[in-house]
Amino acid sequence: MGTLYSHSRLSSFENCPKQFEFRYILKVPRETESVEAFVGKRVHEILERLYLFVGRGQIPGVEKVVDRYHKLWEETWDPERVRIVREGTPLAFYRELGERCLRGYYARHYPFDEDETLGIEKRVVFPLDEAGEYRMQGIIDRISRARDGTIEVHDYKTGARVPSQQRLDEDRQLALYQIGLAREYGDDVPYRLVWHFVARNQIRTSTRTPEELAVLREKTIERIDEIRRTTVFPPRKIALCNWCEYKPLCPLYAEAHPGSEAAAETPAEEARRGSVAARDVKRNEQLDLL
Ligand code: SF4
């Protein structure tokens, strides 16, 4: 069986091929994570736990949920590993942000009877083509059946930005999950993609036509082919470089590594990289920054 691709694997290649190389080809271990990623994981874990209890008919009170969050924070916090990238932002800000996300979500959805949960943190693996040469995987935050029978694909976002409806209507991640879920729940039921922007207490939804899903399959296969053909992975400066766990190894930040690949860059290469960088700053505006 060949490589399993995922939305984040493809995004890493699209955002910066060098990061993709570090992460997926060279498999350089990630020794640090950003505090934004840390908070996001804790919020996801608490919501997963909350729905497990809801499924058993035992809805915990909001204070219990918040207490559990703070306990989990203390159990998992590691100042050696978690980095505060935005200098000057106090740690308390991030910890309170997670609490605010959970309180807002709880108040909005209590008593959690608006739909039936079908899966939590569910892993899906599915082919994009008949022959199974292009296989995807993903983990879906929550799957539910709404009262009208629609299968809903839920995703929690802890970033501050809420993308435009147009961007969400073109979003790849949840639409791919829909393709995966159709193998289980069928093509003939309606699906809805649901984003919970918990830091803003806002919900956005979108749907896909069969034609849009067919185009998505094709485009994703083309991207995988491009990755398979690629042998050189240049670094590409993006708005998220400060959040990149490989920055200390990156030739673009070579001050600490004289004589490296970046130090030998020609003016033409530098100019080309500059125009690519401008495009990517725009692309990354939608990514998850708190
Ligand atoms: S620091 Fe920036 S340019 Fe370097 S690998 Fe990471 S994302 Fe790419």
Image (cartoon, rainbow, N blue to C red):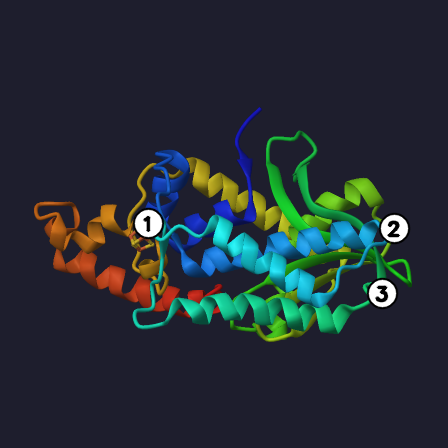
Q: Which residue is mark 1?
A: 80
Instruction: Inspect the image, locate mark 2, and give the three-letter code of the amino acid beneath it.
Output: Asp
- On residue 114, the disc is 3
Q: Secondary structure at mark 1?
A: loop
Q: Is mark 2 within 8 Å of ligand 1?
A: no
Closer to us: 152 or 159: 159
The residue mark sitting in front, 3 or 2, is 3
Instruction: Inspect the image, locate mark 1, and give the three-letter code of the amino acid beneath it.
Output: Glu
C-alpha distance separating marks 1 and 3: 41 Å
Q: Identify the residue shown where x is 67% and y is 49%.
A: 140
The residue mark sitting in front, 1 or 3, is 1
Q: Confirm whether residue 106 shows in the render.
A: yes
Q: Is residue 184 left or right of residue 206?
A: right
Place of residue 110 in the rendered image (x, y in percent of width and height, measured from the top left)? 79, 68
Q: Is residue 274 left or right of residue 113?
A: left
- On residue 188, the disc is 2
Place of residue 165 in the rendered image (x, y in percent of width and height, measured from the top left)? 63, 74
The residue mark sitting in front, 2 or 1, is 1
Place of residue 86 in the rendered image (x, y in percent of width and height, measured from the top left)? 34, 68
Q: Quadrant of residue 191?
A: bottom right
Q: Identify the residue shown where x is 68% and y is 49%.
A: 177
Q: Is residue 69 left or right of residue 105?
A: left
